[in-house]
Amino acid sequence: MSGPGIPEVSGLRSRLVVWLFHHFFFLRRGMTLGVRAACFDREGRIFMVRHTYVPGWYLPGGGVERHETALGALEKELREEGNLVMTGPPELFHVYYNRGASKRDHVLFYRVEVEQTEPRKPDREIAESGFFDLASLPEDVTSATLRRIREVTGQEPPSDMW
């Protein structure tokens, strides 16, 4: 690019400038990715957790870390939050934009059949957890969680927004 008062940028210098801008925007605008799952047992009950640090009941899940696959993150979160193991392949239900978390956050939402290896004991992260009949969910389920349950059970179409 050249013109009055704008110096022309040579080949190597041009590539360096493009490289610097690319990496600046990558670091500045990095996307975050999370996984969550509607986990059903053999009786058709859904698994939910109540964290110690935020109010309400949620579906299990968490962030995908560097050098971790989405399915690896899903498996880890189910194990950590509920002592859950998948009894079949998880089905990717939908991908959501989660603007409440950040301008660049997305959530992969799965439907999965699970078994619990043993009851999950409360700790500093999880206050309580358990399986619930869809007709008798806890009173303080978050609104986003209720929307995801209605979507995955076919009661309403999926939204693109978490």
Image (cartoon, rainbow, N blue to C red):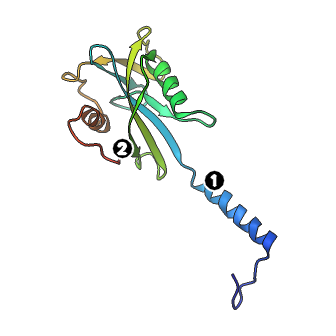
Label 2 CA crowd tier, 10 Å (few <14, some 14–19, many 20+)? some
Q: Residue furthest front?
A: 89
Q: Is residue 101 left or right of residue 43?
A: right
Which residue lies at the image location 43% right of the left edge and 21% below the top edge? Answer: 126
Image quadrant for the N terminus? bottom right
Pinpoint residue 27: horizontal percent, then vertical percent.
63, 53
Residue 114 vertical placement versus 3 (above, below): above
Image quadrant for the C terminus? top left
Pinpoint residue 19: horizontal percent, then vertical percent.
72, 62
Pinpoint residue 142: horizontal percent, then vertical percent.
30, 34
- Disc 2 residue type (three-letter): Trp
Q: Is residue 140 left or right of residue 19?
A: left
| The image quarter in which residue 54 lies | top left
Residue 94 vs residue 121, the one in the foreground? 94
Please give the label number shown on residue 127: none
Residue 30 vertical placement versus 131 (above, below): below
- Disc 1 residue type (three-letter): Leu
Q: CA distance from mark 1 to mark 2?
A: 24 Å
**Upstream in sequence: badge 1 or badge 2:** 1
The residue carrying mark 2 is: 162
Label 1 CA crowd tier, 10 Å (few <14, some 14–19, many 20+)? few
Q: Secondary structure at mark 1?
A: helix
The residue carrying mark 1 is: 27
Which residue lies at the image location 59% right of the left edge and 33% below the top edge? Answer: 68
Kindly check if marks 1 and 2 are in contact, taking CB atoms under 8 A apart as contact. no
